[in-house]
Image (spheres, rainbow, N blue to C red):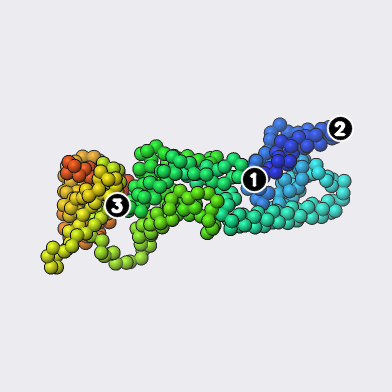
Amino acid sequence: MSVVRAGGDDFTSCEVQRELCEHFVASRAADRWVVLPERFDDRGYGGATVDRPALEQLLKRIEVGEVDRLVVYRLDRLTRSVIDWGKLLSKLRHHGVQLTLVAGDIGGLEAATSDLMLNVLASFAEFEREIIGERLRESRALRRKRGLRSAGLVPFGFRSDPVTRQLKPVTVDAEVVRQIFERVAGGARPSQVATWLNELGLPTKKSGAVGGGTWSAKAVLRLIRNPVYAGEIGGARAAHAPVVLRELFDRANEAVLARRSRAPGRRVTEPKGDPFLLRGLVRCIHCERLMSTASGPERRRNAPPPRYYRCRGTPTCRGTQVSAQALEQRVLGWLHSATPCASSADAAFVFPALEPIWPVLFPQVVRRILQQLIREVRWDGRRNRFTVALNRAAIEEYARELRGAKEKAR
């Protein structure tokens, strides 16, 4: 039985190791050595751990008595940990399995001397692993200091240069990244941005078995917080061109911090000073940009100033605005109508239950509920009408909580 492992070294790849082991076993054909047909190849795994699928399968074969001798090219192909080596040696001894090393076989030595040599080899293998790891860390730190990419997944919006391995922006994806930052900076929630990306049919970045799936709020947050998009790596100016300006990067991250929810179980006062119930939800139907908020001068003493949702997107939309008070009342009225209630059983349960309590809730509470239940309000200024996209998952959660509260009240 032979076992091989490859962690990236071309010379000691799995195929080369297996060929050397098979030649060694063939040379001992007179002693009736035969290689079992099953392969135990751990490709891409390091020797720092024994939690490797092929090795685990091999150990199961050993435990049932199907293996008499284990042949490996070098001891460090089996493990690079002294502690793990001690456990493996104990298991091999317990099941009567002999160990043979193709490179530097010590089978002719006395048992005590053989164990000593194996322990020394295991110690050197672990020492070599630590030295390699230290050199890699130093090399990566130096590359980050110089603004060079060293390893890791390629972020969305970039590709890896086949020669330099540095990041190169992909024109189409980079434009999507800029829109993501603009939407978040304009007040859109990460979950809303993720929904928008999924509606466009854009998959997340794929690298091997990772990525290539649907977007989530967490994936959007990771993108927003990644300084690579602003042209930075490890706090230094990166070798690649930035996808977004630093000013836009900072505004988007400040918007995320401003929306951070309170810690679970911690009692805090409701935030004050934001009267806009639909901030970050209203989108102009003509230019597809989020509408900003604005307040006018006070018209009467002790009266709140007029508020507006304004579109400052393209020149054709410049100056388009709608009274915030009027739009908010119209949206609340729509939520109480039969239209959203007909969309699902949960909506038919939630909105009638909320209707009588809206007047007694603080504006901040109303705003928080609307921000959760509504995914987007699309405003058509030319026709003076709007459409509302609801957050189905949030409505389902609200319905579950309200039903639970009713059950407890009985």
Q: Which quadrant of the view contains residue 41?
A: top right
Q: Amino acid at mark 2?
A: Ala
User: Residue 270 placed where, x, y %?
Assistant: 28, 64
Decide: marks 2, 1 in contact (CB < 8 A)? no
What residue is shown with label 1? 45
Q: Amino acid at mark 1?
A: Tyr
Residue 337 seen: yes
Element class at badge 2:
helix
Left/right placement of residue 387 relative to residue 200 reads: left
User: Residue 371 placed where, x, y %?
Assistant: 28, 52
Residue 370 seen: no
Residue in the foreground of this view, choosing between 4 and 156:
156
What residue is shown with label 2? 30
Q: Which quadrant of the view contains residue 315?
A: top left
Distance from label 1 to label 3 (Cα)? 46 Å
Element class at badge 3:
loop
Q: Is tag 2's residue or tag 1's residue first in the polypeptide sequence?
A: 2
Distance from label 2 to label 1 (Cα)? 34 Å
Residue lying at 29% horizontally and 67% vertically, measured from the top left: 269
Residue lying at 59% horizontally and 56% vertically, measured from the top left: 146
Left/right placement of residue 208 relative to residue 253 reads: right
Q: Which mark is residue 280?
A: 3
Q: Amino acid at mark 3?
A: Gly
Residue lying at 48% horizontally and 41% vertically, measured from the top left: 170
Q: How many marks?
A: 3
Residue farthest front in this picture: 315
